[in-house]
Amino acid sequence: MEEYSEKNIKELENQLLSKIGYFSPRKKDAIQYEKVNRYLYLVRLLYELKAKLHEDGLVITVHNGQQRFQKANSLIKEINTTSNQLLAIERSFDFEVENSPVEKPTSGSDLL
């Protein structure tokens, strides 16, 4: 299982911030900077959710008066939602990735 550590988060933060362009000579692009902060918040949240899921298990027992039944842990849905939010932010970053196997989409004007 992935281990949460503030060191890992700090390395991720440094890597992401190094890819942000500058709005002016002394100030980073504010929109991209905000995206990095939101991304890091969601990464921390994801680690915490995974740790709690590991602690509680995939299936939980619910007590309702005399009734007891088992159901899937609702943290699974939260983890999936958080993962989707992370992916959405990743897609919105304006980073140039060196040696990326993914090609940028063409405008279509070269098809004529």
Image (spheres, rainbow, N blue to C red):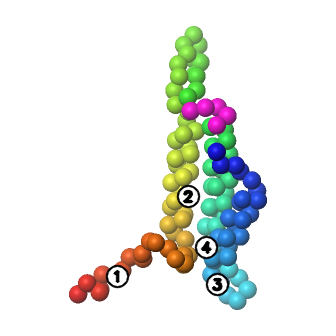
- Give the amino acid type for the residue marked by disc 2 in the picture: Leu
- What's the CA distance linking mark 4 and mark 1? 24 Å
Residue that protrudes farthest toward the bottom in the picture:
25
* Residue range highlighted in magenta: 54-58
Which residue is denoted by mark 3 in the rendering? Answer: 23
Classify 65 as above or below 100. Answer: above
- What's the CA distance linking mark 3 and mark 2? 24 Å
Contact? badges 2 and 1 (CB < 8 Å):
no
- Give the amino acid type for the residue marked by disc 3 in the picture: Phe
Taking depth in this image into account, of 2 and 48 the one nearest to the observer is 2
Classify 21 as above or below 9. Answer: below
- Give the amino acid type for the residue marked by disc 1 in the picture: Ser
Residue 25: x %, y % from top left: 70, 89
| Residue 30 visible in the current orientation | no
Which residue is denoted by mark 2 in the rendering? Answer: 86
Q: Residue at x 61, y 32 (%)?
A: 57
Contact? badges 3 and 2 (CB < 8 Å):
no
Taking depth in this image into account, of 58 and 61 the one nearest to the observer is 58
Q: What element does badge 1 sit on?
A: loop
Q: Residue at x 58, y 39 (%)?
A: 75
Q: Main secondary structure of the magenta part?
A: helix
Taking depth in this image into account, of 98 and 112 the one nearest to the observer is 98
